[in-house]
Structures are given as structure tokens and as C-alpha cells.
Image: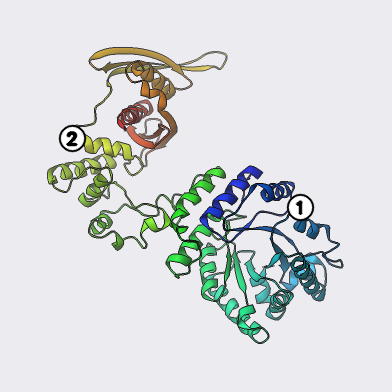
């Protein structure tokens, strides 16, 4: 995938996570062709102790006009010590003639020789029929012959690959149905073992994979979070969840499905990618409800607006509080925070009205749970104890003739009835404000040292333009155990930042 590169150590960690999930096969790369993949297999043989999965080495069938025993590339696959080989073979006549530059007969001989040699070395062998669906449309007789040849040679399964990713589900169903009918004339049903490999160029990779299973595929391939070339591959985790929850196919060991979300996010972190919040089943927003009408129904029965129980895939349902929120949304969100508003209609009405007012001015509580909790507790409990009260702040930014920019902030705050003044410098005005405030509070609140700023987002709100536009700031903080986000909105960037910063520190100091 463009922008993604695993180190060997990363790949070992990913393999362990996938084995923990309970997948059957883990394809580790192309030994002999890519040095880091060769190193991976060497280390995997010594360091990985799979409880469930088998490691797969990917490569090609032997070269034309040679033998698998003499082919150095094929020998590298055997040297990898992987118990399973996945060999890519051409199934589109145009690729045979134009890419391989060989004859149709020699292509079939390459497949037969490679599969048999792998089997002679006690390896399971899968054949990936590259460009199968394009080839099938072009010449279904030859594409079918490629599949039959591989099965006759002893392939564990023959995988039909939508290499260009241009197919839609009806294409997959039609090809599988017709192919199985052709093969049934020569092979018993138990030998017609077909698989599916889908690229996502039409956005249908997962749908194509499910369609293939419904049409008789017994082997499916996918990648973690759909990472792959161009728009990616079928998302392995979405495929698994659909097979188990929609088709009733038990593909993971007991307890595996509930690990889906955690494993998905863990692999994203290893890849240094932000987990896709909107991924089906595993995304942070997969079971997040925003509209008030949804929340009202969920209050009666969560199944009314969830297609599966989020717990089944290790996820959680979330209620978002926005300008669309009604009383039910606020009540359910309060329940998430441990605040029961069901018998306090007056507070519920006030909070709902206040949320709608602030959201209309640009505040965003769906992205800032900590700010929402502060608002609710202010209304219901008189507020969390505030470790300080602002008197005034001042920020100065100096730019000298040498091009050096230095920000200096002075804050004057009330801390436990005592006025404290502190000055600090930073690489920007917000950093300087943060440093000055921490300095003012450090003596009485040593826990501040545990609170770190993990993200800072600034957005100009829609409908406001120019340098005097209204600004929204989101600040995320962490204490090493949890992360929370607060929001500030103001025409002045520094004021918006101060509001979010002050609330974030106050929330963090109260979190325990």
C-alpha cells in the first residue's frame, strides 16, 4: 500500500496478532525476491510459534522452458521453510502470450510441475489464478483449463483473483457458477476447491468475496484493514465478520471474533496508520449514533439500530451528542458517563438546550467527550472541582532580525484562594500558555507532569472566512492510561485554545 512499509519486526508482530485472531494461513511475503521477506521467513522459522495459523510463502510458478527443481526462485520458496506455498499463475490467455511470452501449453506445464514439486517437498500448495475474471471473460475455456490443471496436479485450492479489481458481485457469482459447472464434468465435488482474492478498485472487494463464498468458494484471502495496492484488498476483518454474523460460517476459533476490533487497531498502530474510524464492525464510529431519533429507539432496545451487537466483534456502541441530539441522546450519553438523568427532566432539558445552542455556534461535542462531561456535571452536580480559576493571561510573540520566533505567555490564576502569576516561553503561543499554566499549578498539582498533549486540531468554521473567522480548537490529552478531548470556540485562536487547554487540564486532574 502506498505510504505503508513494515519492518521485519513489524511483520513478525502482525503475524502473531493474526495467529492470535485465529486465521488459518498467513502469507508472509516473497522470499528470494525481496531481501526483507527472505529475512522475515528466516526469523519466523525460529521465532514464531503459531498456535493456529500456517505460514505461507508467496511466489511464482517456475519459469518457462525450465523445471521447478532448477528454478532458483522456486528453490527460494522451499528454502523459506514455510509449510505452505502460494504460487501465482497466469489464467488470462493475453497475459500468457504477452506477459510470459510463452505458449498456452507451456503455461499449463509450469503450473503442473510447480504444484507437484511443492507437494513432493511436503508443502501444501495454493494456486492464485492471476487476472482470472478478465481471462474468463476473454476465454472461459482456457481459464477453466488452468484451474482444472492446478487441481489435477494436487493444489490444495485454486484461488480466483480479481487482480485488476474491476469486477462487481454479479460478475463473481456468474463466473463461479459457470466454472463449477464446467469442472463438475471431470472432477468430483470434493476436489473442486476454489478460493477468492479480491482487489477493491470498484469498492466491491468485500462484497465480491462474500458473493464468492455464497457461490461455493471455500477459501478466501484478505488483508488486515484492507491495506493493499491501489485502493486496497478485501478487508480481512470485514470479510470475517460478515462470514460469521451474516452467513453463519464459523471461520475463527471460539473467542476469536470478539478480538476483531482490538487486532484491527493494533495492526493499524504497527503500520503507523490511524485506524479507520468508519470501518465496518471495527471502526470507532461503526456503532456510533448521532440522530436523536436513533437514540430514542436505542433507549428502548439497542438492537433497533444496530445490525449486530457491537460486543460480538469487540466494539462498543456510542451515542454522539450534537445539534441533532434530543433528550434521549443526552440521557444515554449521560448513562455512558455514569450520570443517571432519567429522573431529572429539568436538568435533561437544560443540558439538551445548552448543547444545541453551543453546537450552533461551532462547538463539537461528538469529538470532545470530556467537554460534554464537564458541561453535564456543571448542570447536575455543580461541576467538577476546578483546580484553578483564570484571572488574566497575556501572550507575546517576538520575531527577531535573525528569523527566530519566540512566544512568551504570562498567566495570572487563582489556585486554592491564592493568586499565582507565572511566565514561560514556548515555540508558539499555545505551547507558551500551556507551559505557564503548568508552572503556576505545579506546586499544588504534581499530577500535571503525567498529563501530555497528544493532539491539537484547528479548524476555521464553515461560514466564516478571513483572518477574523471563528475558530474551533480540539485538544487531546493523555495520562498514559486514557485519552480525552476538549473543545474551545472563539473568534480568537488563542482564546479558543485557552478554553480547550484549561478544560483539558481540569478534566485530567479530576479523572481519578
Residue 109: tell me if it is visible.
yes
Q: Position of residue 69 (x, y in %)?
A: 84, 64
Front residue of 341/277: it is: 341
Up/down of 54 relative to 43, above or below: below
Q: Who comes first in sequence, dot 1 or dot 2?
A: 1
The crowding category of the residue bearing disc 2, from other C-alpha atoms within 10 Å (few below 14, some 14 to 19, many at least 20), is few
Q: Where is residue 442 in the image (x, y as percent from the top left)?
A: 36, 18
Up/down of 112 relative to 60, above or below: below
What quarter of the picture does the C terminus occupy?
top left
Badge number at residue 33:
1
Front residue of 234/500: it is: 234
Instruction: State the SS at label 1.
Output: loop
Which residue is pictured at 57% across the width and 14% down the height? Answer: 402
Front residue of 493/454: it is: 454
Up/down of 436 relative to 187, above or below: above
Which residue is pictured at 40% across the width and 52% down the height? Answer: 315
- Disc 2: which residue: 381
Amino acid at each position: 500500500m502506498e505510504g505503508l512499509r513494515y519492518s521485519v519486526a513489524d511483520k513478525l508482530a502482525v503475524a502473531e496478532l493474526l495467529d492470535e485472531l485465529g486465521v488459518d494461513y498467513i502469507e508472509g511475503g516473497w522470499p528470494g525476491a525481496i531481501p526483507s521477506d527472505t529475512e522475515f521467513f528466516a526469523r519466523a522459522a525460529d521465532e514464531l510459534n503459531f498456535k493456529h495459523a500456517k505460514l505461507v510463502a508467496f511466489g511464482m510458478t517456475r519459469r518457462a522452458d525450465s523445471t521447478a527443481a532448477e528454478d532458483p526462485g522456486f528453490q527460494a520458496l522451499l528454502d523459506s521453510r514455510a509449510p505452505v506455498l502460494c504460487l501465482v499463475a497466469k489464467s488470462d490467455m493475453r497475459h500468457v502470450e504477452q506477459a510470459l511470452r510463452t505458449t498456452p501449453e507451456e503455461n499449463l506445464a509450469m503450473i503442473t510441475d510447480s504444484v507437484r514439486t511443492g507437494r513432493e517437498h511436503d508443502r501444501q500448495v495454493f494456486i492464485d489464478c492471476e487476472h482470472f475474471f478478465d481471462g474468463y471473460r476473454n476465454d472461459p475455456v482456457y481459464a477453466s483449463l488452468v484451474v482444472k490443471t492446478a487441481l489435477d496436479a494436487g493444489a490444495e485450492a485454486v484461488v480466483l483473483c480479481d487482480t485488476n479489481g474491476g469486477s462487481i458481485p454479479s460478475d463473481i457469482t456468474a463466473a463461479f457458477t459457470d466454472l463449477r459447472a464446467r469442472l463438475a464434468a471431470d472432477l468430483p465435488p470434493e476436489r473442486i476447491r476454489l478460493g477468492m482474492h479480491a482487489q477493491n478498485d470498484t469498492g466491491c472487494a468485500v462484497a465480491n468475496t462474500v458473493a464468492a463464498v455464497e457461490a461455493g468458494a471455500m477459501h478466501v484471502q484478505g488483508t488486515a484493514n484492507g491495506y493493499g495496492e491501489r485502493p486496497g484488498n478485501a478487508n480481512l476483518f470485514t470479510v470475517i465478520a460478515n462470514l460469521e454474523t451474516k452467513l453463519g460460517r464459523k471461520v475463527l476459533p471460539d473467542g476469536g471474533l470478539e478480538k476483531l476490533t482490538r487486532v484491527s487497531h493494533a495492526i493499524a498502530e504497527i503500520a503507523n496508520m490511524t485506524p479507520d474510524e468508519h470501518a465496518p464492525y471495527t471502526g470507532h464510529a461503526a456503532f456510533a449514533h448521532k440522530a436523536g431519533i436513533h437514540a430514542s429507539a436505542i433507549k428502548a432496545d439497542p438492537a433497533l439500530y444496530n445490525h449486530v451487537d457491537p460486543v460480538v466483534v469487540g466494539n462498543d456502541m456510542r451515542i454522539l451528542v450534537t445539534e441533532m441530539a434530543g433528550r434521549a441522546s443526552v440521557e444515554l450519553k449521560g448513562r455512558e458517563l455514569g450520570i443517571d438523568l432519567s429522573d431529572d427532566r429539568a436538568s435533561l432539558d437544560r443540558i439538551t438546550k445548552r448543547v444545541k445552542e453551543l453546537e450552533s455556534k461551532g462547538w463539537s461535542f461528538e469529538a470532545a467527550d470530556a467537554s460534554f462531561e464537564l458541561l453535564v456535571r456543571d448542570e447536575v452536580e455543580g461541576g467538577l472541582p476546578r483546580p484553578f480559576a483564570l484571572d488574566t493571561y497575556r501572550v507575546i510573540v517576538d520575531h527577531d532580525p535573525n528569523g527566530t520566533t519566540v512566544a512568551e505567555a504570562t498567566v495570572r490564576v487563582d489556585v486554592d484562594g491564592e493568586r499565582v502569576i507565572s511566565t514561560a516561553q514556548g515555540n508558539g503561543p499555545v505551547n507558551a500558555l500551556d507551559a505557564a499554566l503548568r508552572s503556576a499549578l505545579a506546586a499544588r498539582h504534581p499530577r500535571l507532569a503525567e498529563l501530555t498533549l497528544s493532539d491539537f486540531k484547528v479548524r476555521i468554521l464553515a461560514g466564516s472566512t478571513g483572518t477574523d473567522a471563528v475558530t474551533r480548537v480540539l485538544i487531546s490529552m493523555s495520562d498514559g492510561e486514557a485519552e480525552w478531548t476538549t473543545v474551545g470556540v472563539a473568534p480568537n485562536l488563542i482564546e479558543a485554545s485557552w478554553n480547550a487547554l484549561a478544560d483539558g487540564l481540569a478534566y485530567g486532574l479530576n479523572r481519578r
